[in-house]
């Protein structure tokens, strides 16, 4: 996603583009053999780029879908993710340039007569991946003894099962 500074007019530049999921090939969280997490749609970018005196601003949003396993029952869950982008780019010589600081704004440097937004956009995508995904707030998960999905079936395992790692705690007197 390289943009020449000369392409950014005084009125700004509205950039609407998309990338295929393989554009993220260098992100191991999304492209590891046998993993259940993967991008399931194109990555759509809707960005507004404008120049100020000594800096360039990039505002907009991304839109993409990702398939995750539920953190409790491992069922597939597809999420639409739409992170906002707020970026201020300064030439390396003007790193300390004064701009109106907004909460949630990122700051980067560029050199030369073009800016490359590719690495920054990949960073935004990885940063916005959720750490924990649930298929439903009431998800009952998997039986710790037999592994049955408790949302789909009621297994015959006893509810008195104790994790063997905590067995020694039963004998403690408090």
Image: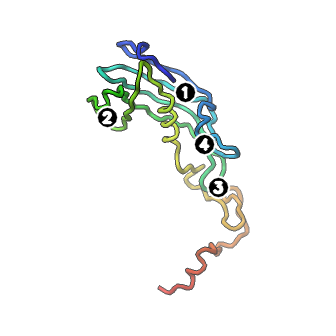
Between the residue at mark 1 and the residue at mark 4, the CA separation in whole angstroms equals: 21 Å
Residue at 36% across / 35% down in the picture? 105
Between the residue at mark 3 and the residue at mark 2, the CA separation in whole angstroms equals: 39 Å
Residue 158 image point, x, y percent: 68, 73
Numbered disc 3: secondary structure: loop
149 over 16 or under it: above or below: below
Q: Which residue is mark 4?
A: 28
Residue 73's mark? 3
Numbered disc 1: secondary structure: strand
Q: Nearer the viewer, residue 123 or 145?
A: 123
Determine whether, in the image, residue 7 is placed left or right of residue 98: right
In primary-sequence order, the first of circles 4 and 3 is 4
Q: Nearer the viewer, residue 91 or 147?
A: 91
Between the residue at mark 2 and the residue at mark 1, the CA separation in whole angstroms equals: 24 Å
Tags 2 and 1 touching, CB below 8 Å: no
Between the residue at mark 3 and the residue at mark 1, the CA separation in whole angstroms equals: 30 Å
Residue 110 image point, x, y percent: 40, 27
Indicate which label's residue lies in the foreground, 4 or 2. Answer: 4
Between the residue at mark 4 and the residue at mark 2, the CA separation in whole angstroms equals: 31 Å
Q: Which residue is mark 1?
A: 44
Numbered disc 2: secondary structure: loop
Q: Which residue is mark 2?
A: 102
């Amino acid at each position: 996603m390289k943009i020449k500074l000369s392409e950014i007019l005084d009125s700004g530049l509205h950039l609407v583009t998309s990338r295929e999921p393989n554009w993220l090939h260098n992100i191991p969280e999304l492209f590891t053999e046998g993993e259940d997490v993967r991008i399931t749609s194109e990555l759509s970018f809707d960005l507004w780029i404008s120049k100020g005196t000594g800096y360039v601003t990039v505002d907009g949003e991304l839109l993409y879908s990702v398939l995750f396993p539920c953190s409790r029952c491992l069922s597939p869950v597809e999420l639409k993710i739409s992170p906002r982008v707020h970026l201020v780019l300064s030439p390396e010589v003007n790193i300390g340039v004064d701009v109106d600081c907004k909460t949630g704004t990122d700051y980067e440097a560029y050199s030369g007569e073009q800016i490359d937004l590719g690495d920054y956009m990949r960073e935004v995508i990885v940063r916005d991946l959720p750490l924990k995904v649930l298929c439903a707030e009431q998800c009952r998960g998997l039986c710790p003894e037999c592994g049955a999905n408790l949302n789909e079936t009621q297994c015959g395992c006893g509810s008195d099962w104790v994790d063997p790692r905590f067995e020694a705690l039963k004998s403690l007197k408090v």
